[in-house]
Amino acid sequence: PGSILMLNDKLPFAPRVALFGLADCLVNSSIRHGLSLVPLEYVLISASAKKGTPVLSEFTACSRVIPGAIRVNPWRSEDVARSIVKCMTQAEHEKAHWRSQALEWCQHNTVYRWAENIVEDMKKVRANMIHMGEDVSRSRSCRVGLVKSSYKEISSDILKPSEVNSAYLSNNARLIVLDIDVLVPPKDEIDDSSWQGTLASIDLLAKEKNNYVFLFSSSSPETMLSLLSSVANITKLGLGAEDGYYYKWPGSPTDRWDQRQHVVPQWKEVCASLMRAYAERTSGSYVEDDQVASVTWHYGVSNPDFSRMQGKELLNHLGDTLAHLPVEVVVGKSFIRVRHQGITKGALLSHVLQHYSTRGGVNFLLGLGDDRMDEDLFQVLKEYHYKAQNSTTDGQEPSARVFSCTVGRQPSLASHCLYTLDEVQELLSEMSLQTKRKMRSSTTMLDLSYGR
């Protein structure tokens, strides 16, 4: 009794300074906190009083910037207790080192420097918004207001099925690249008729003699084959699994997969251990580390606000830890992935285009994707389209018709957009219908020839 003094009222500045001067340790266990100056006050006071290091919740902004601050997860009481013990038993020379570092940081980062950084960040945000299709305007009530354009205003063009069908019929060497992750419905709807209809459309497109249909995915080869088990002409499909690490050419059996490059796996355990630490503290998240060229932290079913916060923190940790390794960190719709350099869907598409260019080339390209993982694919299509336009003289049609289309996500490097999965299914259905009509027409002509 009497060992704990609980103060519910907010302390004025003078008593707070006196209390900090006597305290051996400051513990801030907030579960959500913005910019709080209290830890900074403690740093300035403890430097002269020669006290300990602050123990700060990882959900406070100050915990990321104060050198030497012991960061803890306030939901884990055992970790908080261990951190307090560590602070109290820290060697004196170590305390002195971190006190000097923290004091120097506080004295260097003044209010004026914070203001300059904020203004610079606002300038960068504005430049990025204008580049992405947004603008800045002024009004009476707000000196500077952000005016966000709608998707349809940002998009350079909405993909019109009639235009795609016209180009599809007028060209005879067609490359169709689909990110299958766009088309796959939720697990509880995998037998839905719309999904089966999509597979039937893909099956018909693969039957066409002059079509090269490639399906790309971030999943493993086994998962892809399971999803496509009902496709009769699956051997006629080109497949790319694990973001292009494994790939299969059209006409090859389903058990023959090639590999893009050799992957050095030493970095995977570093990433996996770091991601598992965040998976433990983020309910509903999990780590996928069974793929050869990537490790992924999924947080799709976690609390959105908390998982976004954890995701930003994980990105910072990964950036610092993996800076010297041959990997890149990418952010998807509800996951963060670390993958080996050069293992991308765009790199695989470049390989495919180079392969067919030595065999006469293609004059119709359609690429569909839906997230940031597909932007490198859109970049390759954009460059191919640019070369096709520049290879023709004035008044002539381009040597190839190229359609790159993003589904839902805006803005994008893709030249066209669609907004729903139903629109994608409608597009594939109309293209497969053209194939079906051509097959019926050829069958009718063959019957007539035999009748003669």
Image (cartoon, helix red, strand yellow):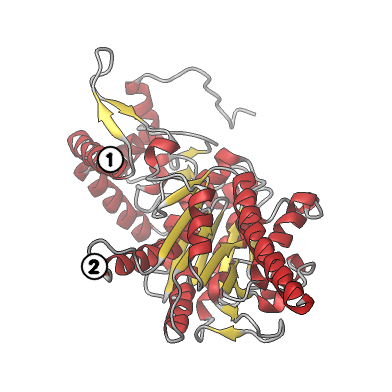
- Residue situated in front as seen by the camera: 448 or 237: 448
User: Percent from the top left, x then y, of residue 411?
Assistant: 41, 46
- Residue situated in front as seen by the camera: 219 or 58: 219
Compared to residue 285, the image places residue 444 above or below, namely below
Q: Find disc 1 in the rendering and name its residue.
A: 130
In-image side of 429 versus 61 (left or right): right
The residue most toward the top is 140
In-image side of 302 versus 97 (left or right): right
The quarter of the picture where the N terminus appears is top right
Is residue 266 visible in the rendered image? The answer is yes
Q: Secondary structure at mark 2?
A: loop
Q: Find disc 2 in the rendering and name its residue.
A: 393
Is residue 89 visible in the rendered image? The answer is no
- Which quadrant would residue 180 be assigned to in this image? bottom right
Compared to residue 77, the image places residue 205 above or below, namely below
Disc 2 packing (10 Å; few <14; some 14–19; many ≥20): few
Q: Residue at x 65, y 60 (%)?
A: 432
- Which quadrant would residue 114 be assigned to in this image? top left
Q: Residue at x 63, y 84 (%)?
A: 257
- Of tags 1 and 2, which is closer to the observer? 2
- Residue situated in front as seen by the camera: 141 or 260: 260
Compared to residue 61, the image places residue 237 above or below, namely below
User: Percent from the top left, x then y, of residue 91?
Assistant: 41, 59
User: Percent from the top left, x then y, of residue 357?
Assistant: 42, 81
Q: Secondary structure at mark 1?
A: helix
Which badge, 1 or 2, is on the more N-terminal residue?
A: 1
The residue most toward the front is 452
Q: Residue at x 51, y 86 (%)?
A: 262
